Amino acid sequence: MRYANMALCLFFVSCTTTREAKLPLAEEEIRALNDELRDREVSINATGPRAPVYEGPAAEDGFDDRYNVVGRGLLLDSQTASWSDARTGQKKALPLATLKSLTWLSRGHPRVVGFFQGAALGLIGALPAGLAVAGASQRGCQSYFGGGPDCRRSPSFDPTLGGIGGALAAVLIGGAFGAIVGHHDEIEFTSSR
């Protein structure tokens, strides 16, 4: 189970292009991010000691450690990040300094890119496993049947076919997961102080 969790983490991380932005943001960076995030659904991750979340001018509620929400119409200025909550449609805002990261589905063809990334990960992981299983079955055939003609003629004991079959299945499964998840872009914010 541990290896499956590690594989899933690797899969989701590999489908994201991450870049870093130092706070406070320059006006050009704010303008470029606003253009890039316009009309996008964005996962917002913020943190801070009781950093308030605002609805209009009045504080709505606070949060202690981490704040994760999906928003639409994210707009950054020199002091705040504001958006509409994707579930409720409520306008929300928080201080720009509390942002830790923003993640969104990439522009262009993110599902196609995700398919190929997932297929590549599937191939990398499954080809050696398929060859190992097929090689083990070949050795089993030789020990069970004594290495007779049935082992050489039977395609079920051919390690090459086992490796190709395992790799093909993994490419299709990995590609399907990659297409579902899609390729994402992420910005991680760091303090320049």
Image (spheres, rainbow, N blue to C red):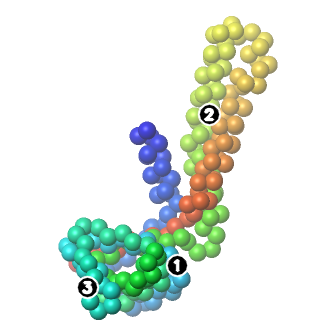
Q: Secondary structure at mark 3?
A: strand
Q: In which quadrant is the C terminus drawn?
A: bottom left
CA separation, marks 2 and 1?
Answer: 40 Å
First in residue order: circle 2 vs circle 1: 1
Q: Secondary structure at mark 2?
A: helix
Classify 10 Å Cα crowding around label 2: few (below 14), some (14-19), many (20 and above). many
Residue at 69%, 37% in the rendered image:
164
Q: Nearer the viewer, residue 166 or 58?
A: 58
Query: How far from the left and from the top, in percent, is residue 112?
Result: 65, 63
Q: Amino acid at mark 3?
A: Ala
115 versus 53 height, above or below = above
Residue at 25%, 85% in the rendered image:
59
Question: Is the Cβ of the residue at disc 3 closer than 8 Å to that at disc 2?
Answer: no
> In the rendered image, is residue 186 in sight?
yes
Q: Secondary structure at mark 1?
A: loop
The residue at which mark 2 appears reads as 130
CA separation, marks 1 and 3?
Answer: 25 Å
Q: Amino acid at mark 2?
A: Gly
Q: Amino acid at mark 1?
A: Arg
Q: In which quadrant is the N terminus drawn?
A: top left
Residue at 65%, 9% in the rendered image:
144
Q: For this view, does 61 lie left or right of residue 187?
A: left
Residue at 55%, 64% in the rendered image:
183
Residue 168 lies in quadrant: top right
Q: Nearer the viewer, residue 73 or 9?
A: 73
Residue 62 lies in quadrant: bottom left
- Foreground disc of the pair 2, 1: 1
> In the rendered image, is residue 78 in sight?
no
The residue at which mark 3 appears reads as 59
The residue at which mark 1 appears reads as 40
Residue 50 lies in quadrant: bottom left
